[in-house]
Image (tube, grey):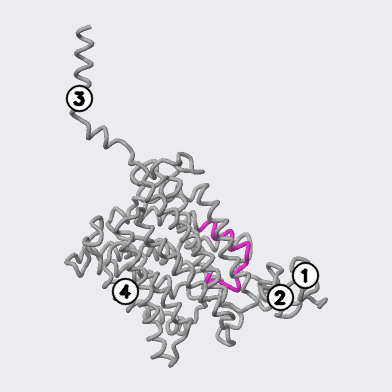
Amino acid sequence: MRSRLKTFMLAMLALLLLPGIAWAAEAPAIDTGDTAFILICAALVMIMTPGLALFYGGMVRKKNVLSTIMLSFIVISVVSIVWVLFGYSFAFGTAGSEALNSWIGGTSFLGLNGVGPEAALGVMTIPHFLFVAFQLMFAIITVAIISGSIAERMNFPAFIAFITLWVAIIYAPLAHWVWGGGWLFQLGALDFAGGTVVHISSGVSGLVAALVIGRRKGYGSEPLVPHNLPMTVLGAALLWFGWFGFNAGSALAANGLAASAFLVTHICAAVGGLSWVAAEWMHRGKPTVLGCVSGAVAGLVAITPAAGFVTPMAAILLGLVVGPLCYFAVAVVKAKFGYDDSLDAFGVHGVGGTWGAIATGLFCTTTVNEAGQNGLFYGNAAQMVPQIIGVVATVAFAAIGTFVILKVVSLFCSLRVSADDEVIGLDATVHGENGYVLGDALGGSLISSAKEPVSGISGVPKSV
């Protein structure tokens, strides 16, 4: 009896002497404030993709407005399924070996097995389910951006096959490299909300897709002008609004860092719109609405990787550079080389994302984020090395991977619609719809009218 009592007392003493070890092993508690904040941020990021649909939809010709919008909306459905089945696991799961885990997340979360309402990955104060949903919205908008490069000509079944493979083979590994503990994270590359993972990858992939599929009919010989700029402005406004969730939410908590990211996001967007307009005004003699909203989007792109690491004054400098830089890429470089990046996904996201990733290495400071690094202008030139490596690796991986995926898809279906379908318009020929014809004008519903054969580029049924 005395021996048992002695053993019990020793055990209790050990517990009292080692409370820190016992508590450290416990998962952090769910914080309701953080959870509410990230729930809202996830919803804000989700609305960015419909916003992008309107932004892109207004810039195409009216015969392709619905097909362009459809590309963004179908992405929401396809990527959501892929993310649940294996995308999230490849990005944030754990591989079987440490060496493999540097490159891809593995199969630990396939089908969201092991994911529940507990703290995300054992270190966050939000539910794991919420982290999955928040990251899903990033994957969706990234894939939707690519559609801007191939609008008005890519075959719809080929697009679905392409994005399914792209999420698994390109996006998920990139997300793991940067945010999931992969080799770029280990190298020290800073990317707060997706300069490399989201913008460079989508912009470069869009450019490759545009080159492989080829230019639109009439490109360079006839005007291919936006048909509804107010729609584009509305889309840009939704993007700007949703971007606060994109960048501020990447703090993954309702705290001072989120507030800082929110502020610099707005500042850079505002300055980007102004600097694009100034460059355009000097170059072409007119300040355009399209230029203003394009510059604002370019500013949002540039601040994305830097949002959690830079000061408001640095955000102004980022915006001052990105407007003219992206304008030059769109107005001069594209015209010189003759590639048909339909809606300038590469010119804005690829170029703007590259500047943002490099500028992060210039302006990042631990006074904003203690978990980050000081950059070149704060005495640490070495931070430029991982930033540049991250850019180069992303460009190479996205370009090569996209080319291979497109070639594989082309073995099973045509990447491009027929010449006749392209001339008539994809709204009528692919989807059997017309974006600007009301059902009563055709003497019946849109559904019944869409089934009738069409003639000419107007897409009006022959029976009319």
Question: Crowding at label 4, few (<14), some or many (≥20) Cα neighbours within 10 Å?
Answer: many
Q: CA distance from mark 2 to mark 3?
A: 78 Å
Image-based side of 407 in relation to 187, left or right:
right
Q: In the depicted view, which residue is nearer to us: 331 or 112?
A: 112
> Mark 4 and mark 1: span between their CA atoms?
50 Å
Question: Does the CB distance between marks 3 and 1 fall below 8 Å?
Answer: no
Q: Residue 80 bears which disc, if any? A: none
* Earlier residue among tags 3 and 1: 3
Query: Callout 4, which amino acid?
Result: Leu
Residue 165 magenta = yes
Q: Earlier in the sequence, mark 1 or mark 2?
A: 2
For marks 4 and 1 on the same chain, the one whose residue lies earlier in the sequence: 4
Which residue is at a point 62% across and 65% down the rendered structure image? 156
Q: Is residue 204 rendered to the left or right of residue 381?
A: right
Magenta residues, as a range?
A: 148-166
Q: Secondary structure at mark 1?
A: helix
Q: Which quadrant of the figure contains the N terminus?
A: top left
Question: Disc number at residue 437?
Answer: 2
Q: Front-most of 455 and 187?
A: 455
Q: Callout 3, which amino acid?
A: Ala
